[in-house]
Image: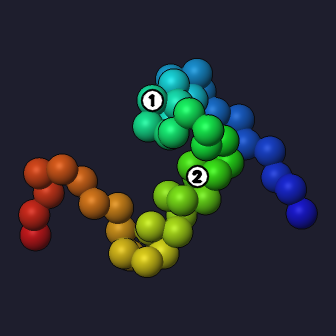
Amino acid sequence: MTHTLELSEELVERIDSHRDEEQSREEFVEELVSIYETEGAFLQEGYSE
């Protein structure tokens, strides 16, 4: 089943600034989800526990 998400223009610009030129937005989001599932959380620069 396919779902449609509405994203703000600002978020689309942020996504586009991080993804590779040949990478679709969907592929980029899939990669983020895979990283999250593997690591349990997204890593942030300057973050320490």
Q: Which residue is mark 2?
A: 29
Image quadrant where residue 33 sits: bottom right
Q: Position of residue 2 (x, y in %)?
A: 86, 56
**Residue 17 circle label:** 1
Horizontal side, residue 46 vs residue 42: left or right: left
Residue under the image location 61 percent in, 38 percent down: 22
Q: Which mark is residue 44?
A: none
Q: Compared to 33, does 11 lie above or below?
A: above
Q: Earlier in the sequence, mark 1 or mark 2?
A: 1
Please, what is the three-letter code of the amino acid marked with disc 1? Ser
Q: Secondary structure at mark 1?
A: helix
Q: CA distance from mark 1 to mark 2?
A: 13 Å
- Which residue reaches farthest front? 22
Colour treatment of the image: rainbow
Can residue 27 be seen? yes
Q: Residue furthest right?
A: 1
In the drawing, does residue 20 fall left or right of residue 24? left
For the residue pair 7 and 39, the one nearer the viewer reads as 39
